[in-house]
Amino acid sequence: MSAALRQLLEPLARLAVARGVTHATLDELLKQALVAAADRSHATLPPHRRVSRITTSTGIHRREASRLIDALRDGAALHTPVARSHASELFTHWRTNPLYGDLRGSPAELPRSGPAPSFETLAQSVTRDVHPRSLLDELVRLGLAAHDRERDTVRLLREAFVPHGDAAGQLAVLGRNVGAHLAAAVDNLLLDDRQHFEQAIFAEGLGEQSLAEFRVLVRTQWQALLAQLVPALEAMVARDDAASPAAAGSATGPRHSVRLGFYTHAQPQPARDAGGADDPPSTDTPR
């Protein structure tokens, strides 16, 4: 188990070193997460017994566990949901709504204002609480779009919503995506029934040209998946809103949020003996 945990922690350690996050900060965050997990596991116990059980479960001293529980109760920081940004929603609509695409299915360059399809109507389809100009300024600030002032048109610059030059935004995206993937994997490992879809494909022996072709293929497949899933999910949300506009916990049951991830990771593989053959591509499904 220790080898598996180390494999999970090594990328986090590399990020911490690169961003100047110290051991003391990581230690505090890890203790907060441990206490929060243990607190949820023993939620039915009375408070005085729960502290003892948390101390036993985590190995954290009772006084320290009490401090962390009080901080958790006061701030509830570990349970605060992260709201989607209007910029993220606009970016997704631009990439998936055919009205705002070109003949190849890619996001079209749009006139800034005017009737649909324009950036103004796209922004208003996402929200009327924020002025389209403010949304445009935000996309430009994040390095996601460019405004041609002479032609007064707007075009996307990136294929994924990863804010350029915004370290806090990039870390937030990383935390949501990797955190959701890890949470799904842990649920599948600890619970009797596999609640979440989690599979991977791996292959060895790709040359540089093949790796470049693979990356193009992945981007194409992701765009096709986006184009199919986003409208379907929007239709499902609208249908469920119409059936039960009340908040979560209504007679029809609680509402759920979903996150679907799609990632690749490539690295040089160790040299092998001459004449050695690579295994064919295969899937990796956790048991």
Image: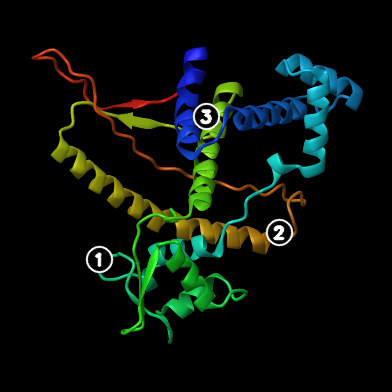
- The residues tagged by marks 3 and 1 sit, at their Cα atoms, a distance apart of 36 Å
Q: Nearer the viewer, residue 82 or 226?
A: 82
Residue carrying label 1: 104
Q: Is residue 253 left or right of residue 120?
A: right
Q: Position of residue 18 (x, y in %)?
A: 45, 37
Q: Hey, what amino acid is under mark 2?
A: Ser
Kindly identify the residue that appears in the image at 58 percent across and 26 percent down: 193
Q: Earlier in the sequence, mark 2 or mark 1?
A: 1
Q: Are marks 3 and 2 in contact (CB under 8 Å)?
A: no
Q: Nearer the viewer, residue 4 or 31?
A: 31
Q: Position of residue 239 (x, y in %)?
A: 60, 61
- Mark 3 or 2, which is nearer the eye? 3
Q: Amino acid at mark 1?
A: Arg
Cα distance, mark 3 to mark 2? 31 Å
The residue labelled by disc 3 is 185
Residue 35 seen in render: yes
- Label 2 sits on residue: 244
Q: Is residue 68 above or below residue 121?
A: above
Q: Residue furthest left?
A: 275
Q: Disc 2 and disc 1: Cα gap in Å?
A: 38 Å
Between disc 3 and disc 2, whose residue precedes?
3
Residue 241 higher or lower than 128, as above or below = above
Q: Mark 2: few, some, or many residues within 10 Å (few <14, many ≥20)?
A: some
> On the rendered structure, is 47 left or right of 276?
right
Q: Mark number for residue 125?
A: none
